[in-house]
Image (tube, helix red, strand yellow):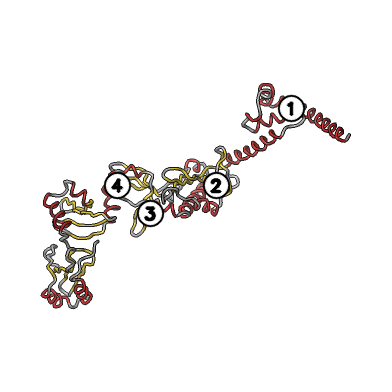
Amino acid sequence: MEKNKTRGWHKTIRAVRRLYHSLNNYRSKATNLEFRDFSFLEYANVQPDDIKDFTRLNYVKQLDLAKKGYINTDLKKLLKYFREKERLMQKDHKILPVGNLKVLENDSLLGMVQLGFDQTDKTFFMASRNHENIPLWKPFDDSRLGKYLSEMHPVSQNTLQFQHTFFEMDVSQCSEERKEAINKFYNSTVQLSFQSNSYFKSAILSPGEEMLSDAKKFVGKTFRLELSKKENHLMNLTEATNHYFVFQSFLESAPEPESLYFNKKEFKERFLDSGITLIARLKHNLHLGIQNGILQIGKRDEVNGIGHLQWESFENRIGSNSLSAIEKYYLSNEVISKKDFLVEKDTIVLQSKTKKAQLKKHYATGKWRFAEIQKHTKELHFRPVDENVLNHIEANYGESKNFNSAVAQMKINTHEQTPKL
C-alpha cells in the first residue's frame, strides 16, 4: 500500500515538473532561436553521448524534464563533466599567456609548464597539465614549480634540456606597469627553474672546434661564454652560418633577450683560442698549446707587422697549406718525435739591477736551460745549465728575490724528465 502511495507521489511530482518545464521551454523557444532549432531538428535524433558542449546538453536536460519529468544518471554525469569543462575554459579565457617552460631529453618533450597572468585579479598562474588542450591553471607557487622540475630525471643520458619561450606579443597588450611586473616575474621564474635541477646544467655546452665546421648542428643549444673576465654568461645560439654566429641571453629574455653576434674569426679567437694552454714557444715563430687534451699549433698571422696568434689543431695544421714543408718537418720530427722544446710552464725569471734572465725546462730530458735577455734582440739563446752556468747565475743574479728557490729547484729537477702535459 505504502509503495503504491510513493509511486503515486512520484508520478504527481513528475507530472508537475513536465508541466512546469513545458511552459518554461515554450517561453525559451520564443526568445532563444538556437534552443528552438535544437528541439525541432536535433533532439529526437541525437544521443547525449554524441554531444560535446555544455549548452546543447543543457537543452537535452530541459527537453527531457518537459517530456519525462526527470533526467537519467548518465545525463547528470555528462552535465557535471561539461559544466566543469566550461568552467576551465572560462578561466583560461581570462588568463593572459605569459610563456612556457619545457624540459626535453634528446629533443623529446618530457614536461611543460605554462605561465599566465589574470589581469582582473592581478595574479600569476601556472599549469603543468592540460585537459583536452585546456590548461589546468593553478595559482603560481614557486615551491610547487621547483618540486615539479626537480623530480624530472633523464632516461638514457645524464642531461636534460631546459627551454623557455616568452610570449612578448601577448604581454605587449598590457600597460607599462603590468608589463614590467610580468617581465620581472618571467625572468625570475626562468632562473629559479634552471637552478631547480642539476641535469639542466649538465646540458650547457662550451665552445668547441666542431662549431667552426658544422655550425648549424648547434643552433638552439645553450653555451657558457666568458664575455667578461672571470664571468661566464649562458647564451643560446639562435643562428649560425659560414660567416657568423648569433647568440641571445638565455636566463634573461623578457622583454627581449640581449643579442650578440661574432664573425667566425672573432669567435674562434675569443672563445676557442683563449682556452688554449701554452706549452712552448717553438722555432719558426710557432707555438705549441693544448686544449681539452688536443695539441694545438699557433702561428702569427701578420700583415704589415700586425697580427694575432691563430691556433689550429696539430692534425689540421699538418694537413693544411698554412705551413711550409720545413715547418711541417720540424713539428713532426723535432717537436713530436724528439720532444725537443722548452716548456713555458714553471718558467723562472731572474732579475738583478741591470740584467734579466730566464730558466726553462727541456721537455724530453727534464734538464734546465738558461738564457739572458738582450736589449737589442727579442730572440733568446738557451744553453744547458752546467756548473759554469750555475756559477754565472750566482755571480750575476744572487740578489734576485727568487734566487735561492730557483737554484734549489734546478738541483732537484735537473735529472728528472718533465712530466707529461
> What is the spatial separation of the Cα atoms under label 2 and label 3, in whole angstroms?
28 Å
The 10 Å Cα crowd at callout 3, few under 14, some 14 to 19, many 20 or more, is some
> What is the spatial separation of the Cα atoms under label 1 and label 4, in whole angstroms?
74 Å
Q: Amino acid at mark 3?
A: His
User: Measured from the top left, where is residue 103 in percent x and y?
Assistant: 46, 47
User: Measured from the top left, where is residue 111 in percent x and y?
Assistant: 49, 45
The residue that mark 3 highlights is 233
> What is the spatial separation of the Cα atoms under label 4 and label 3, in whole angstroms?
20 Å
Residue 26 sits above or below residue 287 on the image? above
Left or right, 411 with reference to 61? left
| Depth check, front residue: 354 or 278 | 278
Residue 17 sits above or below residue 402 on the image? above
| Label 3: which secondary element | strand
| Depth check, front residue: 408 or 119 | 408
| Label 4: which secondary element | helix
| Sooner in the amino-acid sequence: mark 1 or mark 4 | 1
Residue 86 sits in quarter: top right
The 10 Å Cα crowd at callout 4, few under 14, some 14 to 19, many 20 or more, is few
| Depth check, front residue: 185 or 393 | 393
Q: Amino acid at mark 1?
A: Asn
> What is the spatial separation of the Cα atoms under label 4 and label 2, in whole angstroms?
39 Å
Task: State the mark number for residue 25.
Answer: 1
The residue that mark 4 highlights is 210
